[in-house]
Image (spheres, helix red, strand yellow):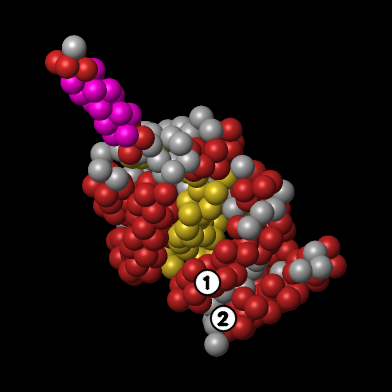
Amino acid sequence: MKKWTITLLLSIAMIVLAACGSDSEKSSDGGDSKEETYTIKVANFYAEDHPQNIALREKFKPLIEENSGGTLKVEIFDNNKLGGEKEFYTAVRNGTIEMGLPGMIMQADVPKMGVIEWPFLLNDMEHAKKVLDGPIGKELTDELSEKHGVHALTWSANGFRMVSSNQEVASMKDFKGLRLRMPNTPIFVKVGQQLGANVSPMPLSEVFTALEQNVVDGQDNPIGVVRSSGLYEVQSHILESRHGFSPNVLIVNQKFWDKLSADQKKVIEEASKAYSDYEWELSNESYEADKKFLMENGMKFVTPNEKFKKQMSDAVQPIYEENYKEFPWAKEMVEKIKAEAN
């Protein structure tokens, strides 16, 4: 009996210890402390050798995979492989893609997001990064989660937009009758119209063919896109108008984000910051290299003088007046952005 009692007590003790061990593997919210493993698809519309994809490959992906202890894997889908901007942004919203790198496509529903692209607002890359990395950048993305179901991780640079064309644009009169492709975003369509061009909105994925077939005479994009997307093969001139700055925002589906552990979120946030800083650096440094490459491949650059710059800036001022009337926050926001240049 005594031996049986001892055996019973030992068995009970082992059960209790096992239960305690099981409890120790639970997280404070009652879930398993063992983290779930996820594969994160990241979609964008840039060519493979664009600074955005270089930074994603060299910083974002390795940092996440190394620092997550193998619980997170990153797959990058560049060059519209998961659809154009509208398609992959919608997919991130509904959760079929975990992450994406759109431009300001969401400004139709979140107008404040679009202010950063208003014409001739930002002076240079330093000014742009200071604005977007600070409180203003956070304010611009505050409504994304509630309205679109996506969480903003960080801002990065596409660059200052310029007009590339198959004919010289060196004065305001050269805009007259120019069939100009612009992104299908109201602010850019208005900019092109105010400059005097005949605007044809279309996604980047259709631009090369439209230029090649002479459907349009020109398009607007940072010169890094002209190089990486091969547009120099079907164009001859670039006007260094710098008429607007275009950023990108790295986003993640909100429901997916909410499923991650605190440690996994921290890993992604740190990798996002490293990717962003590196991408800004690459974009800033690449301008002269891109310009040299494009000139070597036959493109001629037109640098506007101060008079021409002012004429372009004056031409788009009605856009500001219109937005000031429509959005109560607009004038104060523009003033805050301009103040960051000081």
As drawn, the label of residue 340 is 2
Q: Residue at x 58, y 38 (%)?
A: 93
Left or right of residue 156: residue 36: left
Left or right of residue 277: residue 322: right
Q: Residue at x 63, y 58 (%)?
A: 142
Q: Mark 1 Cα within 10 Å, few/some/many (few <14, many 20+)?
A: few
In magenta segment, residue 329: no
Secondary structure under the numbered disc 2 in the rendered image: loop
x, y percent for residue 132:
53, 67
- Which quadrant of the view contains residue 44? top left
Left or right of residue 324: residue 301: left
Secondary structure under the numbered disc 1 in the rendered image: loop
Name which residue type carries label 2: Glu
Check disc 1 and report the residue beneath it: 134
Secondary structure character of the magenta stretch overall: helix
Residue 86 vs 279, above or below: the answer is above
x, y percent for residue 149:
61, 42
Q: Residue at x 17, y 16 (%)?
A: 2
For the record, the magenta segment spans: 6-21
x, y percent for residue 278:
33, 62
